[in-house]
Image (cartoon, grey):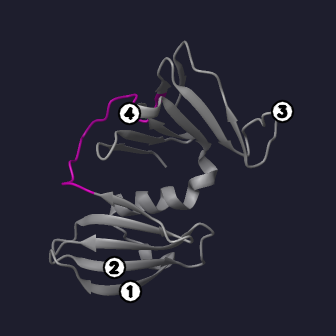
Amino acid sequence: HFLRLDQKTPTPETIIANEEAIWWYIPEKKLVYNYPTGEFGQELKLLSDIFSGLAQVGERFKVALLGVNSKGEHRVELRPDPPWQEVDHITLAVTSGNHIRVVDIHNMLGSITRLTLGDLTVRNKLEEDVFRFVVPEGVHVVLKGSKAPTAAGDSMGNNSEYQSTPHTTPDSLGP
């Protein structure tokens, strides 16, 4: 799955996912997290499904209608079936024209990640590097997951974290 999310508020952040990695860049902190794509397979599939219109949502979720919010949008609850380890449920706000405006992802600890979507813009052509991340100079890279080396230098550190020194020359990964 290929995905790019550019957050503007409350602080600028960018998430880029391609077939090799997921990059979560936080410019204000001069920090980028790098995850193996497989660690977020279900979440990426969910976001891909949402942007595709949730055509097959009933195959992977128990779906419940929750009523209408104060803006007149229909509220829909999606519970992963079978259950996911990290996500309890997802709540969507959908307009009468069937446009998804808000995605709330509820984790097992009770916190919520909210994506507020604007109007859909269809592009016939994307720039060649839209799903490629180039590490800016001076940004720390934190490798996460089973492919990351441990601080002790193991080559197969499961669920480990490794923080590199700042990059002084741009580095690139992507399709």
Q: Residues within 10 Å of mark 2 (few under 14, many from 20)?
A: some
Q: Is residue 175 visible?
A: no
Badge 4 amino acid: Val
Indicate the secondary structure of the residue bearing disc 2: strand
At x 65%, y 37%, the residue is 143
Q: Which residue is the site of mark 1?
A: 64
Badge 1 amino acid: Ala
Q: Are marks 2 and 1 in contact (CB under 8 Å)?
A: yes
Question: The magenta stretch spans which residues?
Answer: 117-133
For the residues labelled 2 and 3, the Cα–Cα distance comes to 46 Å
Q: Is residue 78 left or right of residue 99?
A: right
For the residues labelled 3 and 4, the Cα–Cα distance comes to 35 Å
Q: Nearer the viewer, residue 151 or 53?
A: 151
Q: Residue 20 occupies which quadrant of the picture?
A: top right
Q: Which residue is the site of mark 4?
A: 130
For marks 2 and 3, the one nearer the N-term is: 2
Indicate the secondary structure of the residue bearing disc 3: loop
